[in-house]
Amino acid sequence: MGKIAIIKTGGKQYKVKEGDTIKIEKLSTEPGKKVKFLTLMIADTDGASLELGKPNLGEKVEAEVLKEGKGKKVLVVKYKNKTRYKKTTGHRQNYTQVKIDKIA
């Protein structure tokens, strides 16, 4: 029996449980440091209990920063028909990889 939580960081929401490793938007911390996330919901995996925040529960999820890096390249293509116009650019998004240690 474990717990799952919905956290919010970088304008996105993630469903996590203890021991998960996730990639999130880049944080301004070094690898090896601990971070806490704003928690929107905590529930047991068997459905016995559920805590909902109105609007949140505070910082109840703790994680360790593993590494920072860049994601895979995303190609952006602009094309106009019958005008010989085609432009291709690329983008690599920075990310931070974290491991969920504890859900309070």
Image (cartoon, rainbow, N blue to C red):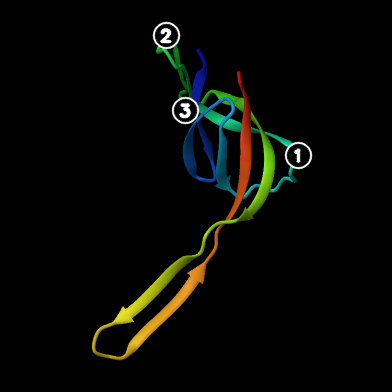
Q: Nearer the viewer, mark 3 or mark 1?
A: 1
Is residue 67 depicted above or below 17 in this figure?
below
Which kind of residue does numbered mark 1 sit on? Gly
**Left or right: 98 with respect to 52?**
right
Asked which secondary structure carries label 1, the reply is loop
Q: Mark 3 points at which residue?
A: 55
Q: Mark 2 points at which residue?
A: 48
Q: Which of 48 and 59 is in front in this view?
A: 48
* Residue farthest to the top, as pictured: 48
Task: Tell me the crowding category of disc 1: few under 14, some 14 to 19, or many 20 or more residues within 10 angstroms, Cα based.
Answer: few
Q: Give the percent coordinates (x, y) of residue 61.
A: 60, 26
Label whose residue precedes the other's in the sequence (2 or 3) = 2
Asked which secondary structure carries label 2, the reply is loop
Cα separation between marks 1 and 2: 34 Å
Which kind of residue does numbered mark 3 sit on? Pro
Q: Name the residue under label 1.
A: 32
Task: Tell me the crowding category of disc 2: few under 14, some 14 to 19, or many 20 or more residues within 10 angstroms, Cα based.
Answer: few
* Residues at marks 2 and 3 touching, judged by CB atoms closer than 8 Å: no
Q: Give the percent coordinates (x, y) of residue 23.
A: 56, 44
Q: Which of marks 2 and 3 is in front?
A: 2
Q: Give the percent coordinates (x, y) of residue 27.
A: 65, 47
Cα separation between marks 3 and 1: 30 Å
